[in-house]
Image (tube, helix red, strand yellow):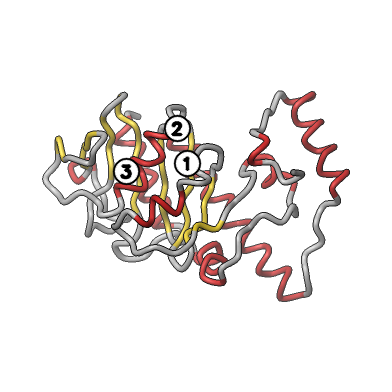
Amino acid sequence: MNLKETLVNTCHKVYANGYVAAYDGNLSVRYDSDKFIITPSGKCKGDVGIDDLIVIDTKGNKLEGRGKVSTEYKIHLLIYNSRPEINSVVHCHPVHATAFAAMGESLNNPVFPEVILSLGKIPLCKYATPSGDGLPNSMSPYVEYCWAFLLENHGAVTVGKTIEGAYYRMEKLEHSAKTLSVIRSMGREKTIPLQKLRELYSIAESTYGIKIDKRSRLDF
């Protein structure tokens, strides 16, 4: 499966799982050092086909494609231009993660070990009008080290070295937010103590070779 086919398949997944509705969201993948494939504006992700995809350059200029470039391409370019190791960006509006974003709450409490290791800090990026420069600017303080972002009153963004990696982080983010919602309907989550958190990081590094940027760790 080539990059375009994989991107289309991922678009269908995010729609099927309810991470987007109607024309919401945008997904992209790095095509080469200065070209990116991105979903078009005004197209349901459940209906996106290979011929709908657009190729843009590092400034957002359309190089290929017949549709209109997604108005939120600036989010994608901020990430690609800041993180050469990132090859895919997924922006969705998953219900539970977006609910936390609309509450003005980050998802930085250390509750689930697998989330701590796979997502790290999940910051809340202050609200800015979509499509403008304010939105990528709100992400700038965290873009160099985070893998998942909540956009206040808007949605969520996840990134990865592959399309699959970015997608599965979105899936993990939403599952975590959904579980936290259930926990809070029952009471309040119990966070992992600092010492146990440090043990988790130590085991992850020594046993599995998982190295996490200190800026993304929850024990600092």
Q: Which residue is mark 2?
A: 83
Looking at marks 2 and 1 on the same chain, the residue that comes earlier in the sequence is marked by: 2
Q: Residue at x 60, y 56 (%)?
A: 175
Count the numbered circles shown: 3
Query: How far is mark 2 from mark 3, CA to CA?
Result: 23 Å
Look at the picture and state if 186 lies above or below 194. Answer: below
Q: Residue at x 68, y 64 (%)?
A: 180
Mark 3 vs mark 1: in front: 1
Looking at marks 2 and 3 on the same chain, the residue that comes earlier in the sequence is marked by: 3
Residue 82 lies, in percent from the top left, at 42, 34
Query: How far is mark 3 from mark 1, CA to CA?
Result: 17 Å
Looking at marks 3 and 1 on the same chain, the residue that comes earlier in the sequence is marked by: 3
Q: Is residue 146 visible?
A: yes
Front residue of 207 and 143: 143
Q: Amino acid at mark 2?
A: Arg
Front residue of 49 and 190: 190
Looking at the image, residue 101 sits to the left or right of residue 68; the answer is right
Q: Which mark is residue 159?
A: 1
How would you rate the neighbour count of disc 2 (Cα within 10 Å): few for under 14, some for 14-19, many for 20 or more? some
Q: Which residue is mark 3?
A: 8
Q: Amino acid at mark 1?
A: Val
Q: Secondary structure at mark 1?
A: strand
Residue 131 lies, in percent from the top left, at 29, 58
How would you rate the neighbour count of disc 3 (Cα within 10 Å): few for under 14, some for 14-19, many for 20 or more? many
Quarter holding the C terminus is: top right
